[in-house]
Image (cartoon, coloured by chain):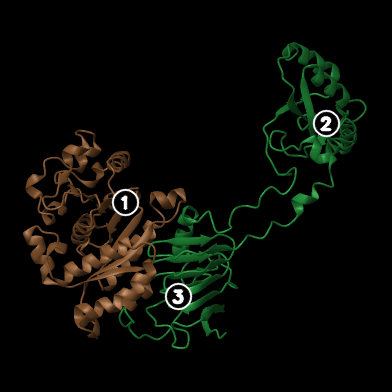
Chain colours: A brown, B green
């Protein structure tokens, strides 16, 4: 059964695309057939971060408009044979995303027996973001530990529970996971960043992981390698934990409650 | 205090001119949730008696002379073609000798005073042409008594086309009392999911109870009182249509705006320490918002 996961945030520049790339890669590393779709039509970045920008011939909009077959637009990752990328168009804008077309693409991917479809949402709350989240089963809400990012995530959480297919049809609500990126415990201590408790108090959404602030993310982006591939970095370990928690669906609360402090100790040598 | 210090200003409760609130109200209908127990009461019985307006045919008579009417009818409407449409017999245009004319000594138009229209004949005439007389308008007391005998309702003085009552309504006088019963109380709207930035709930005509977070940027609005059994961080507006007895109750009062019947206060003036982040109620005392801690 294919699961559609949207990576969203409302605010830009918080690490949605980095997370989409690493999360999808992490799922594929575990042998799960995964497709990651860039919904940021007009400002495509995912292909850069995945290191496939030179292999993009056709994109999501071509498929949505039924100009080509889906298989022609899917780019297979060079390292992981279970990972596929569907790039966004750079020359169109978000109005080119039509709901019927998006639904058809997702249905075709389901028919190809993908385990996971990861939708990398654009920033904002307009068409692109709404399309990316509309058919989602689960959502990773990416938040930075600062007030405006948390506020925007709150808005997105509200939209996930009211504007998506599941919300409109009154089905089971989308499963929401909060992912905090660019977290720097030292700056939290100094009162420059919101703490995990502050963020939890505002959003009250189950935490799936914390990605520390790190220069290796920038390095990974410039190399065109998903951060999860950078061996022995905090960021890669943190993303692997996120994937692990995501797959441990039976007891998600136990994971977030118990793993968080021990993970903290492991990465930062205890506090 | 994750949202930074708020400038310290003397507390004041400015009177809001009602316009912005009307603006909010204007959009609220769309945002009102369907769930939460606000569904209209289900069928209460086998029938409903409602005030309705129907468009009917009116037979406006310009003469009381039955022979003249019958001849004209036969000539202009005798061909029929009616399908039992209801008709109101409108007598308002029938020439009658006015009391003033009689008092002034002028000769009455008819020899024996105001001639009663022969309703029985009119009814027969209409029924013969497949029309269904249901009421009379502009009838004298004498004619009205006859009309009632014939099973016709009184459409009073209003033009026949404007107002008439179905025959059943007249006969079932006891049933009519149901209409006069006060309207059923508006059920309280209950919300059990978090209200996040950008979401707005309006409880029209009644109270609003929220059992989950009301975050910054969310709005909870009620014509009655607002109850939030969780942190209230957004905007809370009670008595949105001017009910000055409405109150706001919060399990943790952190609201960015509090308003009762148009009297409001923003978070620019920090909440008093004894209520900030604590269980509290807000009520209106004249032109002033009172904030009182609640202890359980």
Q: Quadrant of the N terminus of chain B?
A: bottom left
Chain letter of the residue beneath label 1 in the structure image: A
Characterize the local packing of mark 1: few (<14), some (14-19) or many (20 or more) Cα atoms within 10 angstroms: many
For residue A65, side relative to residue B287 (left or right): left
User: Which residue lies most toward the bottom here?
Assistant: B274
**Residue A65 location, x and y as percent?**
23, 36
Q: Say which residue appears at 40% left-offset and 69% top-offset.
A: B215
Q: Identify the disc placed on residue A221.
A: none
Left or right, residue B215 beside residue B87: left
Give the number of the mark in front: 1 or 3. 1
- Can the viewer see residue B99? yes
Q: Earlier in the sequence, mark 2 or mark 3?
A: 2
Query: B55 left or right of B238?
Result: right
* Residue at image mark 3: B231
Circle 1 residue: A4
Q: Nearer the viewer, mark 2 or mark 3?
A: 3
Considering the numbered disc 3 on the image, is that residue within a helix, a strand or a loop? Answer: strand
Q: Chain of mark 2?
A: B
Which disc number belongs to residue B96?
A: 2
Of A168 and B27, the residue lying toward us: A168
Question: Given the image, what chain letter belongs to the residue carrying mark 3?
Answer: B
Which corner quadrant holds the C terminus of chain B? bottom right
Q: Nearer the viewer, mark 1 or mark 2?
A: 1
Q: Quadrant of residue B239?
A: bottom right
**Residue B261 at x, y = what percent?**
53, 70
On the rendered structure, is B267 left or right of B139?
Answer: left
Q: Position of residue A102 (x, y in %)?
A: 29, 42
Task: Please tell me if label 1 and label 2 are on a single chain.
Answer: no
């Amino acid at each position: 059964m294919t699961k559609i996961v949207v990576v969203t945030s409302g605010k830009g520049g918080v690490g949605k695309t980095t997370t989409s790339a690493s999360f999808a890669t992490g799922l594929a590393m575990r042998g799960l057939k995964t497709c990651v779709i860039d919904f940021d039509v007009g400002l495509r970045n995912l292909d850069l971060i995945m290191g496939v920008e030179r292999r993009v011939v056709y994109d999501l909009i071509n498929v949505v408009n039924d100009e080509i077959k889906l298989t022609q637009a899917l780019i297979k990752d060079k390292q992981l044979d279970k990972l596929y990328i569907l790039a966004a168009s750079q020359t169109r804008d978000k109005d080119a995303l039509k709901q019927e077309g998006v639904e058809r693409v997702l249905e075709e991917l389901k028919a190809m027996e993908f385990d996971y479809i990861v939708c990398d949402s654009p920033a904002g709350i307009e068409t692109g973001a709404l399309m990316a989240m509309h058919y989602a089963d689960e959502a990773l809400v990416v938040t930075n530990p600062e007030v405006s990012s948390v506020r925007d995530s709150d808005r997105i959480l509200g939209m996930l529970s009211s504007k998506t297919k599941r919300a409109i049809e009154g089905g089971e609500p989308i499963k929401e996971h909060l992912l905090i990126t660019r977290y720097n415990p030292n700056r939290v201590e100094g009162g420059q960043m919101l703490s995990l408790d502050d963020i939890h108090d505002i959003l009250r959404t189950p935490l799936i992981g914390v990605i520390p602030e790190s220069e290796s993310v920038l390095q990974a982006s410039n190399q065109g390698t998903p951060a999860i591939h950078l061996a022995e970095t905090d960021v890669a370990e943190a993303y692997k934990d996120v994937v692990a928690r995501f797959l441990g669906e039976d007891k998600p609360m136990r994971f977030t409650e118990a793993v968080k402090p021990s993970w903290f100790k492991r990465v930062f040598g205890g506090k | 205090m994750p949202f930074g210090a708020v400038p310290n200003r003397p507390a004041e409760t400015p009177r809001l001119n009602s316009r912005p609130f009307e603006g909010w109200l204007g959009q609220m209908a769309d945002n009102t949730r369907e769930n939460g127990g606000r569904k209209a009461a289900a069928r209460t019985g086998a029938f409903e008696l409602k005030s309705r307006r129907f468009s009917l045919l009116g037979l406006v008579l310009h003469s009381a002379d039955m022979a003249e009417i019958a001849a004209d009818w036969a000539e202009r409407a005798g061909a029929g073609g009616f399908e039992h449409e209801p008709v109101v017999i409108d007598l308002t245009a029938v020439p009658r000798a006015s009391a003033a004319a009689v008092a002034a000594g002028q000769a009455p138009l008819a020899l024996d005073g105001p001639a009663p229209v022969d309703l029985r004949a009119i009814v027969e005439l209409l029924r013969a042409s497949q029309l269904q007389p249901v009421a009379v308008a502009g009838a004298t007391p004498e004619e009205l008594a006859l009309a009632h005998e014939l099973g016709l309702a009184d459409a009073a003085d209003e033009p026949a086309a404007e107002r008439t009552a179905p025959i059943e309504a007249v006969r079932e006088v006891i049933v009519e009392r149901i209409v006069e019963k006060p309207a059923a109380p508006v059920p309280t709207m209950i919300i059990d999911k978090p209200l996040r930035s950008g979401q707005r709930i309006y409880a029209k005509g009644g109270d609003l109870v929220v059992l989950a977070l009301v975050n910054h940027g969310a709005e909870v609005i009620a014509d009655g009182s607002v109850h939030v059994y969780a942190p209230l961080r957004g905007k809370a507006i009670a008595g949105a249509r001017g009910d000055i007895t409405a109150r706001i109750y919060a399990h943790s009062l952190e609201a960015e705006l509090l308003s009762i019947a148009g009297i409001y206060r923003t978070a620019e003036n920090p909440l008093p320490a004894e209520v900030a982040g604590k269980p509290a109620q807000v009520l209106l005392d004249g032109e002033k918002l009172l904030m009182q801690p609640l202890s359980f």
